[in-house]
Image (cartoon, grey):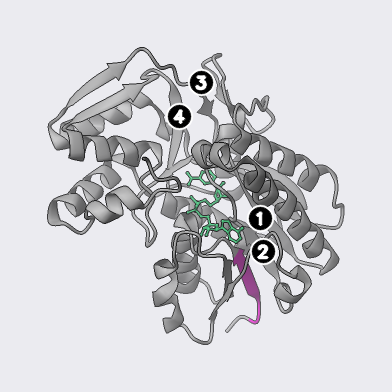
Amino acid sequence: MSSETVLICGGAGYIGSALVFRLLKETDFKIKVFDNLSYGGDSVFSFFNFPERFEFVKGDVRTFDFDQLLKGVDYVVNLTALVGEPICKKFPKEAKEINFDSNIRLARACEKNGIKRFVFTSTCSNYGLNETGEMIKEDGELQPISLYAETKVDSEKILLNELPDLPCTVLRFATAYGMAARIRFDLLLHELIRDAWTKAKIYVFGAQSWRPMVHVDDIARGIMLVLSKSDSIKKKDVFNVGSNDQNFQKVQLAQMIAERFNVIIEETQAVKDPRNYKVNFDKVTNELGYKPIHSAKESIDQIANALETGLIDDRILHESVNVKQN
Ligand SMILES: NC(=O)c1ccc[n+]([C@@H]2O[C@H](COP(=O)([O-])OP(=O)(O)OC[C@H]3O[C@@H](n4cnc5c(N)ncnc54)[C@H](O)[C@@H]3O)[C@@H](O)[C@H]2O)c1
């Protein structure tokens, strides 16, 4: 068994639940999940079946003693955040404290404690609005148009330009979709599916806007790849994580869902989507050999089946969101 330990902050969340599953299944790392359980902790129950390799620590990143948390830890993946624009808008002070201040405090503690690699989970939302129609590469212009993206861009700058002794990989994920132990129904593809299921109609605003998509398990596989190649990759680097062929216009996603559920699409012209970006994923493919294995179509079908069989019930559908609708 490996003597190396990966600390996953925010590991009880959507991506965390997929990542811990992959790491326990395919590596021999020991896993320590740290989370304040904002959305509950059911997602980690089954990981206790690996008692030698799994540990859970409850705490809040804003106040926890990181020197204590980092004892015996080799690698750190920070997934902790208030994720998405709605929750950051609702709790701006907490968003800045959790997504930026605590992230940097954690990174500084990692540098001090000689952590071998800090993986920062950023987002393609950083590209904001790009109407050139070109697929944006990692060195393309960052145009954060929400507090959420601002906290990510600000964090990236410090992680990449300061903290000289901290090996750090920034991963800018496309928008996630797909089944995981903690699923979220406040993400683009899942929201469209929920509309199709509950309203028999898919409402799309900004129908022509481009958005890159990636399966949550493919995000987990990307993080796992970085950890496995940590010794040979650059000390500091940035990768977009996704695939060129999963850049979709929102209406294309709606069409796939409409076909599966046999419902109609209603395009709302009144509201424009301020975000529009197509992303280039060549670097992660060429340099790390990364290739997603899942597709949006496959997930639409899986989630449709889960709704039809009651595997995903009303409670999951309406409560698995970071901010509840009134
Ligand atoms: N889901 C996506 O589409 C997506 C895309 C790009 C980037 N990301 C990034 O990936 C990371 C994980 O996203 P996710 O979709 O799994 O989100 P999530 O909301 O499901 O998970 C976040 C986790 O952080 C924990 N957390 C929040 N505040 C905390 C605090 N103060 N102290 C300790 N733990 C706290 C929550 O309890 C939760 O388990 C985030 O950093 C997010 O910005 C996600």
Q: Please name the residue that numbered disc 2 is placed on.
A: 76
* Lower sequence index among marks 4 and 1: 1
* Lower sequence index among marks 2 and 4: 2
Residue 234 visible somewhere in the drawing: no
Q: Are marks 1 and 2 in contact (CB under 8 Å)?
A: yes
Q: The disc labelled 2 sits on which kind of residue?
A: Val
Q: Please name the residue that numbered disc 1 is placed on.
A: 119
Residue 278 visible somewhere in the drawing: yes
Q: Residue 323 or 217: which is nearer the viewer?
A: 323
Q: Quadrant of the N terminus?
A: bottom right
Secondary structure mostly taken by the magenta-highlighted segment of the chain:
strand
Q: Which mark is on residue 13?
A: none
Cα–Cα span, label 1 and label 3: 28 Å
Q: Is mark 4 on a helix, strand or loop?
A: strand
Q: Please name the residue that numbered disc 4 is placed on.
A: 211
Cα–Cα span, label 1 and label 2: 6 Å
Q: Residue 167 or 313: which is nearer the viewer?
A: 313
* Lower sequence index among marks 1 and 2: 2
Cα–Cα span, label 4 and label 3: 12 Å
Question: Is residue 212 covered in magenta?
Answer: no
Cα–Cα span, label 2 and label 4: 28 Å
* Lower sequence index among marks 2 and 3: 2
Q: Which of marks 2 and 3 is in front?
A: 3
**For mark 1, does the 10 Å Cα neighbourhood hold few (<14), some (14 to 19), or many (20 or more) residues?**
many
Residue 215 location, x and y as percent? 41, 47
* Lower sequence index among marks 4 and 3: 4
Residue found at x 25% / y 49%: 303
User: Does the beta carbon of the residue at mark 1 sit less than 8 Å from ligand 1?
Assistant: no
Cα–Cα span, label 2 and label 3: 33 Å
Question: Is residue 6 covered in magenta?
Answer: yes
Q: Please name the residue that numbered disc 3 is placed on.
A: 274
